[in-house]
Amino acid sequence: MDTVTETSMAVAMAALGGIGMVHYNNTISQQASIILAAKSHKIPFSADLIFATPSDSIHSADEFANSPCIFVTESGNKQSKLLGHVSKSDWKNLSNKEARISAYMNTSPVTLPSSYDFNDVAGYMASKKLDFVALVNEEEENGEVVNLVTSADTERIKGLPKLGLPSLGEDGKFLVGAAVGTRESDKERLEHLVKEGINAVVIDSSQGNSLYQINMIKHVKHTYPHLDVIGGNVVTNYQAENLIKQGVDGLRVGGNVVTAFFRILVPREPSRVIRNGITPDSAMILRLSIPVFMSNLSLYAACLCISGDPVCSFPTKNFVVFFTTYVAALVAEM
């Protein structure tokens, strides 16, 4: 579960009104690339993209996997300039399958800006009778391909219940968070993630009430005062209160990194991003929330989250009502 949140999950969470926290079991550039890709989306899914160079050859239909096309870039990856594409249907009609891609690729692929929402993309595809269209990040010099939408995708999405409002930042992009550790090198990692536009950071530690985490919280709050910070893990009232005093915007409560976590959000003013969580033991977690509740701090609750480096879900009204009632009952018992 430690790599559960990457581009697809982060996009899906934001599209549903939540926020995904991208894991850091990768290099700095890989984590930053995931953040950039997720924030480049405006539609509720992310396709698996396949790339090749002009000098490559396509020997088997299996190389297309489930994609209707292979994108051709200068270096054969998404970070370089788009030169064209090869559709699966065109490749099947080739007489010489050993030919280099440059000999038959489509050098004028149809693309749309990734800032287009689903209705914009679906409407354009319908008007042009397209089977698929690539979405490119117009903010990048090379026009990096970030997604692919097919006619089957548009029909599938149209058949689903209407989505609620997505989670968007002040820049109109999806909200995306990230996890970092407490090492000195994580400060460099965080710098790169902030440049890519993360909206919240989880400081990941099995024992959150430590000098290492406290120093990291202070660093983040001083260097990036606009960034929401979730501290933890904590399992006692003392630990929770100590991190609250350090200025965290949220707490991650739980036993260890393989346990499902409940996030009690405790910003001194309403958080711009965070509002959710899960509990491995409802009674223990809710009791732990009481000192927060009694401190006149804003308390946001709830719903489901997945452990590892966390994925945040969107709030459900019924659970919020349940949570509020349960906390009130526990306070009355004290």
Image: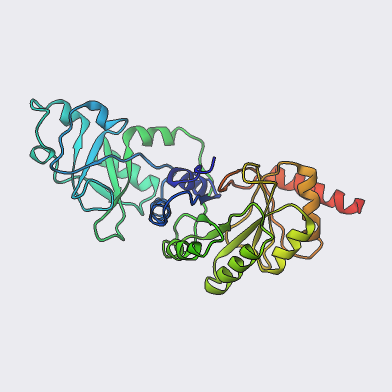
Left/right placement of residue 224 relative to residue 125 reads right
Left/right placement of residue 322 relative to residue 302 reads right
Task: Identify the residue at the far right of this view.
Answer: 333
The residue closer to the viewer here, 278 or 203, is 203
Residue 240 found in image quarter:
bottom right
Residue 148 found in image quarter:
top left
Is 72 drawn above or below residue 173 in the view shown?
above
Q: Residue at x 51, y 65 (%)?
A: 184
Rendering coords of residue 92 (x, y %): 17, 26
Rendering coords of residue 30 (x, y %): 39, 52
Quarter the C terminus occupies? bottom right
Q: How is the image coloured?
A: rainbow
Numbered circles on residues, count: 0
Rendering coords of residue 107 (x, y %): 13, 45
Q: Residue at x 79, y 65 (%)?
A: 295
Rendering coords of residue 35 (x, y %): 43, 54
Quarter the N terminus occupies? top right
